[in-house]
Image (cartoon, rainbow, N blue to C red):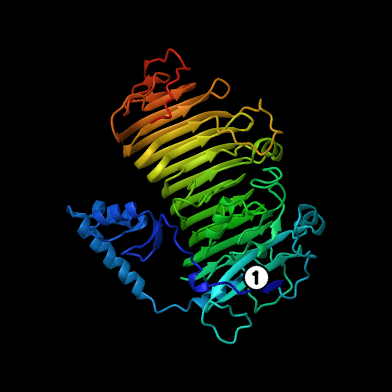
Amino acid sequence: MSAKVWSSEAVAAAAGDPKPELVWATCACCGLREECTPAYVAKVRERYSGRWVCGLCGEAVKYEICRSERRISTEEALSRHTIFSESFRSAAPPIDTAEHLIAAMRQLLRRSLNSPRATRGAKTSSFSDLKVHGIAELSSLLAATAAVIRGRQGLPFAPDHGGGLLLRVEIDVPSAPQMADGAPYDAQDAGSGALGRGVLSGVRMAVILGVEDESYWPLMPPLPSYGYGREHKGPRYGSLIHGQNLKDIVITGHNGTINGQGQAWWTKYKKRILTYTRGPLVQLMWSKDIVISNITLRDSPFWTLHPYDCKNVTISKVTILAPIFGAPNTDGIDPDSCEDVLIENSYICVGDDAVAIKSGWDQYGIAYGRPSTNITLRNLTVRSVVSAGVSIGSEMSGGVSNVTVDNLIVWESRRGIRIKTAPGRGGYIRNITYRNVTLDNVRVGIMIKTDYNEHPDEGFDPKAMPIIANISFSRIHGQGVRVPVRIHGSEDIPVKSVSFQDMSVGLTYKKKHIFQCSFIEGRVIGPIFPSPCANLDLYDEQGNLVKQSVSRNITDIDYDI
C-alpha cells in the first residue's frame, strides 16, 4: 500500500465556480444544489410558486398527486413532500463527515498494510515509459481516491491554504490469496490477505473530491477495445475510483458524494491543453459481482460511471449530475462490453448521454470481441439537453444484444432514445426492447442513426457494416415532442424487424414528416399517434395484417425540424 498526501488549493471552493451561463439553484425540498440555466430556474420557480425544486423532487411531487385519494393541487403535493423531506433530513443527529470518510478509507485498506506488493514504477510521462514500468503489473487496483477532511486535529495529513485537508490514497493490490467472503478493507486489520474483494462504504453525507491538478493523476494504458487512445494517442488519465480484476465489489454510501471537480478538466479539454485522454470518475474493469448504490456521483472529468468488461453489475439508487452545458462527454453510466447488468431506480442529469451502452470502437472493438448483453434499465428519470436519455453506441463493434429499457422518463432533452452506429463499426445491435417510456419536452423522441462517422484512426474497415434488428417499442407516451420518430437506415445498414405498439406522443406543433423513416422494415400493431411512415406494415391488435408496405426504402428524413 502506498499513500501520498498533497495540499489542495482553496478547498473551501472545491465544488468549483459556476459557469457564466449557469447559476446555482438549491432544491427547497431536499437541499440538492444544481447548476442550471437562469431560464430553466425561472421556469421551475413559476411552476412551484417561486420555489426551485430539483427533478427528483419534482417526480416525487407528481407521485404525491397520483397517489392521493382526492384531487390535490401541485402546491399541496409540494407541501406534503417538503414536510416529509424536512422530517427525514432532521431525524438523524448531526453527522461528522470526517468520521465517515475515515471509515471509508479503512474499508478500502483492510489487509493491505503487511501484504506483499507488486513492483510499482514511478509516475510516467510517456507511453513507452508506461509500458516499461508496467501499470498492468498491478493485477488488481483500487486507486486514485481523494477525500477532503475538514477540521480534524492530530491527523498525519498536510493542511492546505484553504482551511481543509486533502488526502489521496493509492492502493496496490498483489496477486495473493483472496480474503474471506464479505470482509471489508480495514486499515486497523493488517492481515496478509490480498485485496481481491472490497467495499467502499460509510460515506454518509460526506464528499470525496477529485484532485484538479492532472499532474497528480496516474496514467494507464488505453482501453484495448478503443485503439491507441480516444482523445490523444498513448496513455490515459486514471479514474478517481478505479478497480480491475476484482470480485464482490460494493461502492455505497448514505447519500454521500463522489465529486470529480470536472470544471478544470472541461476547460483544459476545450482549450486543448491536456496531454492525455481524460479518465472516468469511477471505472471498474474485468471484474464481477459489483454493487453500486445509494450514492451521488457528480462533475466527472469524462464518463461518470464506466464498468468495462464486467459481469453481474447492479447499479441502484444513484444520482449522477453534471452541468447540462459545457461539460463535454460527461455520460452518466456507460456499460461497456458488460454482461448481466441492472441499472435501476436512479436519477441522471448530465452533459452528454445519461446512459450509453457500448462495446468497443471499430477494428479494435471487433478484435476484442466482447459484447454487451443481458442489460436491464428500469425506473430511471434522465435528462440530457445536448445528447440523449438512453443511447446504444456509437462504439458498439463488439455487439449489443438483449437489452430491456422499462419505465423510463426522459425530460427536457435533445433526444429520448437513440441508437447510433456507422460503416466501419461492424458488430450488431439486436433484441432491444423499450417499453413504458415517457417523453416530456424532447426534441426527437426515438432516433436510430447509421452515419455517426467518428473513427479512432484511418485503419477501420469501411466495409464492416453493423446489423440492426429486432427492436421493439411499446407503451411510448409523452408531450411536447417535436419529432417523435426518426429512423435513418441506409442501403448498407438497413434497420430490420422494428415494431411499434401503443404509442401516443403529444407534439410541440403539428407538421408533416414527423414520423421519419428510411430503409426500415417492420410493423405497427394497433393504432398509434402520430401516424407511422409508409415503410411499415400495419396490423390490428389481434395480429391480423391490415396493410402491407409497398416499399422498405422510402426516405422521409428531415433534419431541419
Q: Nearer the viewer, residue 451 or 75?
A: 451
Residue 222 at x, y = what percent? 70, 49
Give the residue furthest to the right. 132
Q: Nearer the viewer, residue 136 or 500?
A: 136
Which residue does the image show at 70% across and 42% down from the upper left?
227
Q: Secondary structure at mark 1?
A: strand
**Foreground: 379 or 141?**
141
Residue for point 68% across, 43% down: 225
Q: Quadrant of residue 31?
A: bottom left
Name above or below for residue 54 compared with residue 189. above
The residue shown at (64%, 73%) is 6
Residue 182 shows up from this direction:
no
Establish if 268 lies above or below 403: below
Q: Is residue 505 visible?
A: yes
- Residue 192 point in image, percent of width and height: 74, 73
- For the C terminus, give its image quadrant: top left
Q: Which residue is mark 1?
A: 169
Left of 389 or right of it: where is 224?
Answer: right
Give the residue type that dot 1 points to.
Val
Residue 411 place in picture, x, y as percent? 37, 46
Nearest to the observer: residue 313 or residue 534: 534
Q: Is residue 182 above or below residue 548?
A: below
Q: Position of residue 98 (x, y in %)?
A: 52, 77
Number of numbered markers: 1
Q: Residue furthest top?
A: 550
Quarter of the picture holding the N terminus: bottom right
Alpha-carbon neighbours of circle 1 within 10 Å: few (<14), some, or many (≥20)?
many
The residue shown at (47%, 48%) is 354
